[in-house]
Image (tube, grey):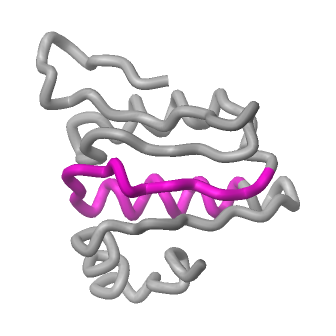
Amino acid sequence: MSAAIGASDELIGGFSAEAAGARWSYAGPLILANASRVFAAAAAMPLPTAGEVDLSGMVAVDSSAVAVLLALSRRAQEEGKPLAFIKVPAPLRALADLYSVEDLLAA
């Protein structure tokens, strides 16, 4: 579900379902400029059935990435489904540590 926002290729980013919806992967940046679009698109997708989200394709992050992942985690809790973020980029892990939400990224 990756789509461009505006005309800038720099803002392409999004989650996509893989393995018949068993897991998600993320590709592109997750920053303030695209966070609301990414979140809205993710909200329209069923959570991955295996509960796994691969973040290895996340190329740029800011605090908006942490907010989106927190919202997805809350959604999974509300739906009673497991959700684990794997292959977390170091800059995202550093932000989670900074905001004392490192447990969010514990696999």
Side of 8 relative to 91 (left or right): left
The residue at 69%/62% (across/down) is 83
Position of the C terminus, as image quadrant, is bottom right
Left or right: 85 as drawn, with respect to 57: right
Q: Nearer the viewer, residue 49 or 63?
A: 49
Task: Name which residue lies at 63% across and 67% down.
Answer: 84
Residue 64, quarter of picture: bottom left
User: Is 37 placed left or right of 91 in the picture?
Assistant: right
Q: Which stretch did the figure color magenta?
A: 50-75
Give the answer, above or below, for where 35 lies relative to 83.
above
Q: 18 above or below 31?
A: above
Q: Is residue 14 left or right of residue 84?
A: left
Query: Which residue occupies the extreme right position in the image?
Result: 80
In the depicted view, which residue is nearer to us: 92 or 78? 92
Q: Measuring from the top left, give residue 16's x and y in whole percent.
A: 53, 33
**Residue 58 is one of the magenta-drawn residues:** yes
Please count the marks in the image: 0
Compared with residue 107, is residue 23 higher up or lower down, i.e. above or below?
Answer: above
Q: Residue at x 39, y 64 (%)?
A: 66
**How far across and down, in percent of the image, does residue 82 sit?**
78, 64
Residue at 26% across, 80% down: 94
| In magenta stretch: residue 62 | yes
Spot occupied by residue 63 in the image (x, y as percentages of width and height): 27, 63
Quarter of the image for residue 50 reads bottom right
In this view, the residue farthest toward the front is 19
| Residue 5 placement (x, y as % from top left) | 26, 19
